[in-house]
Amino acid sequence: MELVPGVHVAVTDRHGGVSAGPHGTRNLGGGTGDDPAAVRANRAGVAAELGVRAIVFMRQVHGAEIAYVSEPFGDDPPPVDGVFTTEPGLALASLGADCPAVLVADPVARMVGAAHSGRPGTEAGIAAALVAAMAGKGAVPARMAALIGPGACGRCYEVPAELRDRVAATVPQIHSTTSWGTPALDLRAGIEAQLREAGVADVRHDDRCTIETTDLYSHRRHDPGRFAGLIWLT
C-alpha cells in the first residue's frame, strides 16, 4: 500500500511461511523458540514478496532508543526500538504480537522510520522520539504521514488499575476500559496523541485488534510468533 507518494507500507500476517507448530506459518521473530532457519526463510520470503533489497530488523527491548540505518544490522542487532533511513529499497520492520508498529514518512525529505510502541515504549514516548530523530536529519513533522499498525485494542487490553493510572498520568489518552468493564490501555489513542503533539497531522490506522484477529499473532492469546509492520522508500 502506498502511504504517500514514493513510500510503501505493509503489514504481514501469520500465513504464507514455513514455520511449523504454534509458530505457523510466517513467524518473523527471532528468540521466539522457532527454528532459526524457518525465521530466515520467512524473512527472505517477505523481502522477495515486497520487492525490497533488504529488511532491517531490530532487537526490540521496549525502550525509546532510535538509530539511523543504511543497511540491515545483521545477526546481532543493537537494542533499539526505532529506526529511520533515507535509503531507497531498504524496508524497516517493527515486529509485534500486540504492540503496534508506528510507520512514519516525510515524502519531501525522502525519509522513513519505524518504531515498536508497546506499553513501555508508548509510556517512554517512542513515537515522538522517532519524529524528533527524523527531524534532526532534516525531515519536517508537518509534512509527515504516519500509520499506526495493528495492536491490542483499548477494549481488550486489560491491565491492573494501578498500571493504567500510572501510564495515564504520562499519556492521558491511553486510559481505557475493557468491553467487560475492567481497566485497560488504549495504545492506539496514546500513540496518535503523541504523534499529533510532535507535529504529525496525518495519522492513519490499521485498526485491527490483534487479540481479536486470528490472522495475526497475539501474545495475549499465547501465540509465540511475530508479524511485522514495514515501511520503505520506492
Image (tube, grey):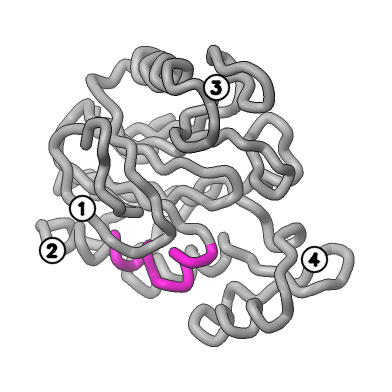
Q: Does any portion of residue 146 appear in the rendered image?
A: no
Residue extending farthest to the right is 180
- The magenta stretch spans residue 127: yes
Please name the residue that numbered disc 2 is placed on.
136
The structure residue drawn at horizontal position 65% and vertical position 46%, both measured from the top left corner, is: 219
Q: Does any portion of residue 106 appear in the rendered image?
A: yes
Q: Which residues are magenta?
A: 119-130
Amino acid type at circle 3 is Arg
Secondary structure under badge 4?
Answer: loop
Residue 145 position, x and y percent, is 35, 51
Q: Residues within 10 Å of mark 3 (few under 14, many from 20)?
A: many
Compared with 197, 156 (above or below) is: above
Count of numbered labels shown in the rendering: 4
In this rendering, the label closer to the viewer, 4 or 1: 1
Secondary structure under badge 2?
Answer: helix
Identify the disc placed on residue 178. Answer: 4
In front: 173, or 73? 73
**Quadrant housing residue 13:** top right
Amino acid type at circle 2 is Gly
- Among the two numbered marks 2 and 3 on one chain, the one whose residue lies closer to the N terminus: 3
Identify the disc placed on residue 26. Answer: 3
Amino acid type at circle 1 is Ala
Separation of residues labelled 1 and 2 (CA atoms): 12 Å
The structure residue drawn at horizontal position 50% and vertical position 21%, both measured from the top left corner, is: 35
- Among the two numbered marks 4 and 2 on one chain, the one whose residue lies closer to the N terminus: 2
Residue 150 position, x and y percent, is 58, 45
Marks 3,4: beta carbons within 8 A: no
**Quadrant housing residue 138:** bottom left
Separation of residues labelled 4 and 2 (CA atoms): 38 Å
